[in-house]
Image (cartoon, rainbow, N blue to C red):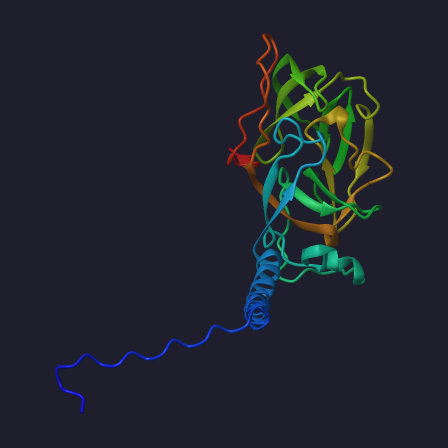
Amino acid sequence: MTSLTDPPAKDAAAPEAPLPQRLMGEAREFARFLMVAIPAYLAFTTVAFAAYHIPSESMVPAMEVGDRVVVSKFAYGYSRQSLPLNIGALMQPGRTRFLEQAPKRGDVAVFMHPQEDKVMIKRLIGLPGDEIAVRDGVLWVNGEKVLRRDGRSIVRVAQGGALETAGRYVEELPGGVTHVIHEFSDYEIYDDFGPYVVPPRHVFAMGDNRDNSLDSRWEGMGPVPMDNLIGRAETVYFAMPHFGKKQVGVEPAAQRWFQPLTRRD
């Protein structure tokens, strides 16, 4: 007979499940996790924010090759291009956007290339109905010369490590957006363009690195349909580090980590 003061008998330890059974259990738990995580990720990157990397130097100095930017998907409303993983390429182009909001001049936009299957990032210079021209390297919008100030010559390290010389200016677009541009000279291939009137439901995009950007001035791209807009780039959340010894007289990369890509005065 067991006394009230005796310790309770211990349960016998349950035998450990065989290894194949344990692995199956872990696999089922991982599958349940994916069933929740993947839809949540797709929903977030469709309606809220997504991340994109910078593949070229067309937006120097605001962004360098290898930088990663945060893009607000809701800035212009939603179209087939808002879907992640390029799913929208399987759908027919549309003429409207859900919860559409008009882009603003000076926005840095991410969009699908109008003629090729690739994602682009450029600054929106012209809106529907705007007349865009470039004369001797200087931008004109609706017949008005755009202010270009604080010009100076710099030497920078280009992609691949070579040194290049460029003119650096502050450009002030109509509406008060100021941003920095680079020009190799005022006599490059696209330094004389237009005048060109932006078609309805299209925008005119240009790179900040004006002489190193294939953009809406180029017949291989042209204006960007509203349907192609993916979102507005807000900031650089990862700035590609540049290793190596600093060189006298060489301009370092611009401070851009978590800096706003669009500044409105």
The residue that appears at 58% across and 71% down in the rendered structure is: 28
Which is nearer the eye, 63 or 32? 32
Where residue 33 sits in the image (x, y, percent)?
Answer: 55, 66
Where residue 209 sits in the image (x, y, percent)?
Answer: 70, 26
Q: How many marks?
A: 0
193 up-or-down from 124: above or below: above
The residue that appears at 69% across and 16% down in the rendered structure is: 166
Q: Is residue 212 left or right of residue 258?
A: right
Which is nearer the eye, 44 or 115? 44
The residue that appears at 58% across and 7% down in the rendered structure is: 248
Residue lying furthest bottom: 1
Where residue 54 sits in the image (x, y, percent)?
Answer: 67, 37
Q: Is residue 199 left or right of residue 156?
A: right
The residue that appears at 61% across and 39% down in the rendered structure is: 68
Residue lying furthest front: 1
Q: Quadrant of residue 39?
A: bottom right
Which is nearer the eye, 5 or 260? 5
The N terminus, quarter of image: bottom left
Residue lying furthest right: 219
Q: Quadrant of residue 21?
A: bottom right
Where residue 229 sits in the image (x, y, percent)?
Answer: 70, 50
234 up-or-down from 7: above or below: above
Q: Quadrant of residue 6?
A: bottom left
